[in-house]
Image (spheres, coloured by chain):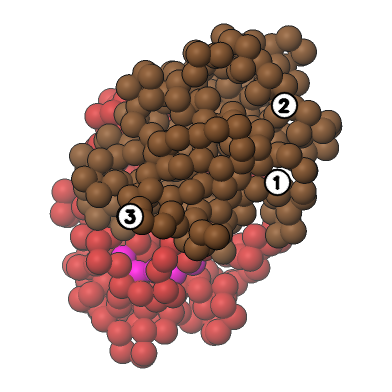
Chain colours: A brown, B red
Amino acid sequence: VNQLLYDGKAKSLYFIDGKDDEVLQAFKDSITAFNNPKPYIFEGKGVVTCQISSHVFKFLERNGIKTHLISSNDSATQVVQKLDILKIEITVRNYAFGNILKRSHFIKGEKLSEPLIEFMYKEDKFGDPLISEDYVLKYLLNNNEELFKEIKKLSFRINELLIEFFKAIDITLGDFKIEVGLNKDKELILADEISGDTCRLRDNLNNLLPLDKDLLREDIGNVLDGYKEILRRIKIKYSDL
Amino acid sequence: VNQLLYDGKAKSLYFIDGKDDEVLQAFKDSITAFNNPKPYIFEGKGVVTCQISSHVFKFLERNGIKTHLISSNDSATQVVQKLDILKIEITVRNYAFGNILKRSHFIKGEKLSEPLIEFMYKEDKFGDPLISEDYVLKYLLNNNEELFKEIKKLSFRINELLIEFFKAIDITLGDFKIEVGLNKDKELILADEISGDTCRLRDNLNNLLPLDKDLLREDIGNVLDGYKEILRRIKIKYSDL
């Protein structure tokens, strides 16, 4: 039995015996929404989000993005690099959905003329609130302007690649959230996951209806069915990953 | 009777007959707090905040800051430049008070190691929420990076000057909010007001207790008495303004 390193809402990290630089990332079946502390359980969700994220991360690696993924199989668990995770969550938006609607002139579902980046404070007790870039730079990145530039550049590059990745399977990328960390060589590495739990993914083949967590947030369909459809298309299109 | 140009929560703007570039800014006795749509009324507050703001703006002008103030007297009304006001509110913080406590690691009242700038969307229906710098630049400043740099530089310079201004009357500047606009020559101009309504001002002579709107927000004293004390000290120290 591996020793628990970190227990999150949707994933846990475990130590691997004899390895200092690698950990197991286990995807849970639970999913939180509506700022409800009690999660919903969808049996089998962890396996599906893990596989979606593994495919996405492999695609990004193939396109020059450094990710924490080391190896994966068809289970709910991956081997990933152990990182110092930065205390920020990064959101990039191509369409206006969710909480941006409470702090902008955008209309729900509107396509943004330019992608928008936002930084949240990764702190559950506050609900991961939006923070100012000045706070990120001065208080979370120790005034490392180069690192901050690199984080922004990386995020927009990932956005370009994800748009392409999902477009090829008839899915429109509305927005996504990522986390990043530094490895022991102080390299910036993409961490966490990219899946229906962390992206807004709209079905070009079905009136742009959600295939993502909005199915649960807006109570308009079975969220696990949406995730399975994403994975089905990925496996057909990206069978080489 | 002057025709109303803009009716805000704490001030109104009126046209001046025969003048295209000047307006009257009238300070109200009303004050809002607790996100309560119904304002509290403190008779005489408008005269006091107007005079505080006039003195502060004159001090800033004397130190090289371009402000909208043209003339003032001892009433609740000033003559100011007519500007295109940008749809942002700018907050600069030296100490941790207020809503920053819900999105940072700071402890209430903590002195920040470096001043922090934040941008809010000036939109009453949303309650002036924090917004990302990327939204400010791309969607509110039309991608004008030079202007954005100038706004940040101006805000930090004003912070330095305000710290000095208030320190000389035994007041610690916790934070403040400003608004800016562009005149017909597209010059960046400080607008709105700077007073107890828009600053956190703590009394060095009385255990750093508030002399500002926090008296009302935290229900710990008569807010008008606080403002009168600020003005009393300003008039003694800055009799030449």
Q: Quadrant of residue B92?
A: bottom left
Upstream in sequence: badge 2 or badge 3: 3
Labelled disc at residue A20:
3
The span from disc 2 to disc 3 (Cα, nearest Å) is: 34 Å
Q: Is residue B198 visible?
A: no
Task: Estimate the x, y position of residue B13 in percent, counting from the top left.
Answer: 51, 44
Q: Chain of mark 2?
A: A
Residue type (three-letter) at the residue carrying disc 1: Asp
In the picture, the quarter occupied by the C terminus of chain B is: bottom left
Labelled disc at residue A228:
2
Q: Nearer the viewer, residue A26 or A39?
A: A26
Upstream in sequence: badge 1 or badge 2: 1
Q: Residue at x 50, y 71 (%)?
A: B213
Circles 1 and 3 on the same subunit: yes
Q: Secondary structure at mark 2?
A: helix
Horizontally, residue B83 falls left or right of residue A72, namely left
Label 1: which residue? A29
Residue range corresponding to the magenta coloring: B94-100
